[in-house]
Image (cartoon, rainbow, N blue to C red):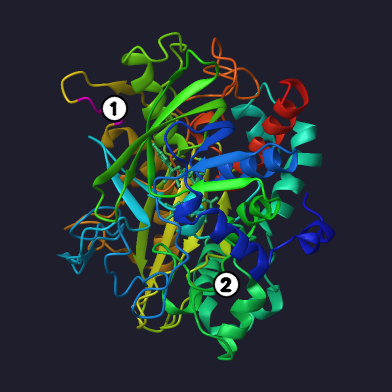
């Protein structure tokens, strides 16, 4: 259990550290061809940020390479990020129309034209699923809902049986929560705040239908949110800002782990650099090739640098794609068969219900969810459903949920020799177990409340948001594709340290688990690998 003291100890670094990160991410700080670095980290999400902090703290100069932008410069509207009601080019990664998770309203396509730009949210399309991912210095922390949930202990033991559970819960989960600056909501305030009316309505209906609910910790500063509700600061979570970034209030990784790494003076960040190849170098270590891109996605330079150690932290999809391609192309031919396998969507499925006219959910809704329905103990279909906002700025009587289920289906990444791309075998039909589990809960709530599903938000006459995920996990599973700490066998100095290590499911929102596992693994690597 995270103690209150741990939560209070959480360190959010202020303006000076943020300025140091901006300096470490400035164009002049980027890698040049021919550079030789002791440690190179591919990607700046949770795994990458933990690696960057612990390596730099250990005295090791570390180069982070991130394909997305640094997101530290305001646009012409004075804001770094756009909101969800007025998406512009900053919203999506290299698309000309938005691809909103809830892409329809009243059955009509609600997407908009945007300029093609290296925006902050990627909707990466595979044959049977769209995978949403953050792009930028801070990875998924820039776009996510901030929910910081520690998985259930017995479920964690099931999914990662080779990991010592006691040390995770005694040491690494608390360490992750502190590093992420996780905070708890003031539950008395929650009961009266207009912006959480939607959550109270869903909570009361869940309880009346026999379900248990639980408060969720978050990295969004709830103290700031209180001031937003009181009207004393500029609104962010209360101004429909979430999945395209938050201008205020959110303690994303660029304000926590990465800022702390920059404060050591040993960090450089090469933003807008896409790693395309990693191979052993004849000079020792590894040659890492990358394309520097402009904001239209065009390559402006190709660079190759040498690194003694390389940490793959490009996320479940990014790391798996890179490693599968390197194996197929003969650059890392000895990677194990398990690389590319065991990918899952954390059982994600979304659904919405239509409330009665007297059950208003509120025109003002916090973008940061603070409560979940916990029906995980139901062996016939475990469900942990976050009560999600629908921050449209107007009353819509909608109750929205992101259900996390125990979908056992998994998929595999493979290199497609004819296209040169890496495919993911997941089929939309593989998400049926997630629908079945969620349906048990929401059918009952609908029956007890005499309400119905909305079928106009995920398509035309489509109840379930079953063809996308926010929670890609797996593809390079701990103790299968790597050793028990993320070392890639046969390639000393190559490590995996992100969500690809987790076998497809955490039973809760995943970033605390990814962070804690990264903390555990980097500690062992620093202690044993002669760094
Ligand atoms: P991630 O954070 O995705 O970082 C990988 C980084 O690598 C990205 O910045 C990429 O741009 C970069 N990259 C990829 N390929 C390359 C390459 N070839 N070269 C250079 N850079 C590259 O990975 N989780 C929660 O726990 N709570 C939530 O409330 C929550 N809400 C979410 C809401 C949304 C809309 C989304 C999309 C996700 C949400 N998640 C949430 C999931 C969470 O953000 C995700 O599990 C983590 O970000 C994954 O962390 P990784 O370190 O694995």
Residue at the farthest bottom position:
231
Q: Residue at x 47, y 17 (%)?
A: 281
Is residue 178 magenta-colored?
no
Question: x and y percent of residue 248 in the render?
Answer: 53, 74
Where is residue 272 drawn, in percent x and y?
Answer: 38, 49
- Work out whether residue 465 or residue 204 is closer to the camera in this orientation and state it: 465
Near mark 1 (Cα within 10 A), the count class, few <14, some 14-19 or many ≥20, is many
The answer, for residue 79, to whether it is visible in the render is yes
**Residue at image coords 45%, 64%:** 448
Q: Could you tell me which secondary element the residue under label 1 belongs to?
A: strand
Side of 395 where 457 appears, left or right: left
Magenta residue check for 424: yes
User: Residue 398 appears at what percent x and percent y?
Assistant: 37, 71
Q: Where, by quadrant of the figure, is residue 21 drawn?
A: bottom right
Q: Give how far across and how far down residue 474 sits, in percent.
A: 47, 30
Q: Which of 56 and 68 lies nearest the eye of the viewer?
A: 56
Task: Quote the CA–CA distance across marks 2 and 1.
Answer: 37 Å
What is the quadrant of residue 118 in the picture?
bottom left
Residue of label 1 = 422
What numbered label is drawn on residue 249? 2
Secondary structure under tag 2 reads: loop
**For the C terminus, which image quadrant?**
top right
Q: Which residues are magenta?
A: 420-426
Judge whether 17 appears above or below 225 on screen.
Answer: above
Lower position in the chain sequence, tag 2 or tag 1: 2
Q: Which residue sits at x=81%, y=40%?
A: 170
In-image side of 333 versus 310 (left or right): left
Position above or below: 485 against 491: below
């Amino acid at each position: 259990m995270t103690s209150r003291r741990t939560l209070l100890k959480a360190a959010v670094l202020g303006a000076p550290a943020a300025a140091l990160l901006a300096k470490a991410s400035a164009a002049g700080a980027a890698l040049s061809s021919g550079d030789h670095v002791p440690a190179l980290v591919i990607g700046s999400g949770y795994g990458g940020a933990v690696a960057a902090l612990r390596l730099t703290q250990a005295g090791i100069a570390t180069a982070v390479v991130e394909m997305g932008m640094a997101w530290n410069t305001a646009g012409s509207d004075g804001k770094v990020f756009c909101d969800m009601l007025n998406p512009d080019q900053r919203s999506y990664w290299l698309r000309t129309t938005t691809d909103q998770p809830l892409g329809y309203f009243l059955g009509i396509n609600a997407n908009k034209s945007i300029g093609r730009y290296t925006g902050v949210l990627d909707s990466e399309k595979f044959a049977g699923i769209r995978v949403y991912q953050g792009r930028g210095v801070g990875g998924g922390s820039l776009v996510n809902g901030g929910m910081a949930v520690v998985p259930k202990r017995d479920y964690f033991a099931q999914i990662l049986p080779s990991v010592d559970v006691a040390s995770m819960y005694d040491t690494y989960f608390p360490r992750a929560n502190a590093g992420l600056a996780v905070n708890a909501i003031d539950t008395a305030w929650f009961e009266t705040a207009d912006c959480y009316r939607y959550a109270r309505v869903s909570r009361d209906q869940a309880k009346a239908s026999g379900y248990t609910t639980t408060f969720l910790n978050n990295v969004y500063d709830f103290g700031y949110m209180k001031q937003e509700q009181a009207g004393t600061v500029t609104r962010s979570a209360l101004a429909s800002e979430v999945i395209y970034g938050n201008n205020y209030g959110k303690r994303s990784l660029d304000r926590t782990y990465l800022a702390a790494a920059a404060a050591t003076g040993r960090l450089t960040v090469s933003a807008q650099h896409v790693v395309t190849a990693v191979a052993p170098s004849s000079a020792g270590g590894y040659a890492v090739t990358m394309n520097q891109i402009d904001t239209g996605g065009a390559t402006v330079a190709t660079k190759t640098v040498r690194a003694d150690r390389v940490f793959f932290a490009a996320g479940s999809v990014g790391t798996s794609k890179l490693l599968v391609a390197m194996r197929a192309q003969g650059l890392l031919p000895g990677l194990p068969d398990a690389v590319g396998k065991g990918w899952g969507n954390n059982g994600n499925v979304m659904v919405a219900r239509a409330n009665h006219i007297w059950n208003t959910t509120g025109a003002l809704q916090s973008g940061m969810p603070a409560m979940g329905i916990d029906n995980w103990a139901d062996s016939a279909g475990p469900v942990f459903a976050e009560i999600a906002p629908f921050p449209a700025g107007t009353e819509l009587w909608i109750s929205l949920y992101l259900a996390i289920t125990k979908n056992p289906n998994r998929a595999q990444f493979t290199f497609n020799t004819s296209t040169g791309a890496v495919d993911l075998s997941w089929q939309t039909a593989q998400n049926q177990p997630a629908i079945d589990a969620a349906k048990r809960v929401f059918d009952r709530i609908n029956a007890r409340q005499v309400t119905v599903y909305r079928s106009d938000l995920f398509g035309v006459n489509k109840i379930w948001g079953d063809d996308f995920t926010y929670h890609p996990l797996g593809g390079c599973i701990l103790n299968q594709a790597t050793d028990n700490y993320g070392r890639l066998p046969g390639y000393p100095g190559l490590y995996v340290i992100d969500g690809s290590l987790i076998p497809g499911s955490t039973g809760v929102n995943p970033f605390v688990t990814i962070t804690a596992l990264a903390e555990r693994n980097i500690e062992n690597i620093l202690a044993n690998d002669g760094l």
